[in-house]
Image (cartoon, rainbow, N blue to C red):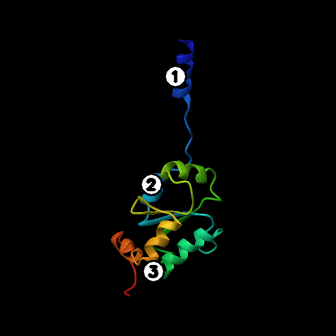
Amino acid sequence: MFRRLAQSLVRTTQFRFVSHDYQAIVNAKKCVVFMKGTPDAPQCGFSRAVIQMLEAEGVDLNNEISAHNILEEDGMREEMKEFSDWPTFPQVYLNGEFYGGCDIMYDDYKNEKLRGILLEAKLTLPEH
């Protein structure tokens, strides 16, 4: 009986402080990228690849996306893994919904689906 009570107390008193309102962050722009580094200075090859694919499709990185450097914002790296239920970075959100990471974007890019996905998300792209 004491064991069950102790376990119950532990379960009810465990909580995790979250330092950011992630739902508000991913809803702030049509395209939100959580990455290592910044669009101007990516700090890993996967983050660089995501930015290059967005640029190749004509996305205006200054106006169309919101990028967050997970290496500089305390707690963000671990908290985003929990929020998205996705273990790796970069993480891309379109219209507040988790889209995926570099591998998913690359598959859509090489299969010529990425442009359509970005247009469906209402990003402004130049005419092809």
* Circle 1: element type: helix
Disc 1 to disc 2, C-alpha distance: 32 Å
Task: Classify 59 as above or below 97.
Answer: below
* Circle 2: element type: helix
Instruction: Count neighbours of disc 2 (C-alpha within 10 A) and say few if under 14, some if 14 to 19, many if 20 or more.
Output: few
In this figure, which residue is indicated by the disc labeled 1? 8
- The amino acid type found where label 2 is placed reads Ala
Which circle's residue, 3 or 2, is located before the other in the chain? 2
Name the one closer to the observer, 91 or 66.
91
Q: x%, y% of residue 44?
A: 64, 68
Disc 3 to disc 2, C-alpha distance: 26 Å
Task: Classify 95 as above or below 13.
Answer: below
In this figure, which residue is indicated by the disc labeled 3? 57
* Circle 3: element type: loop
Which circle's residue, 1 or 2, is located before the other in the chain? 1
Residue at (56%, 31%) from the top-left corner?
Answer: 14
Residue at (47%, 66%) from the top-left corner?
Answer: 104
Tell me, for residue 24, which label it has, or none. 2
Name the one closer to the observer, 46 or 32.
46
Q: x%, y% of residue 119?
A: 35, 74
Residue at (47%, 74%) from the top-left corner?
Answer: 63
Instruction: Count neighbours of disc 1 (C-alpha within 10 A) and say few if under 14, some if 14 to 19, many if 20 or more.
Output: few
Disc 1 to disc 3, C-alpha distance: 52 Å
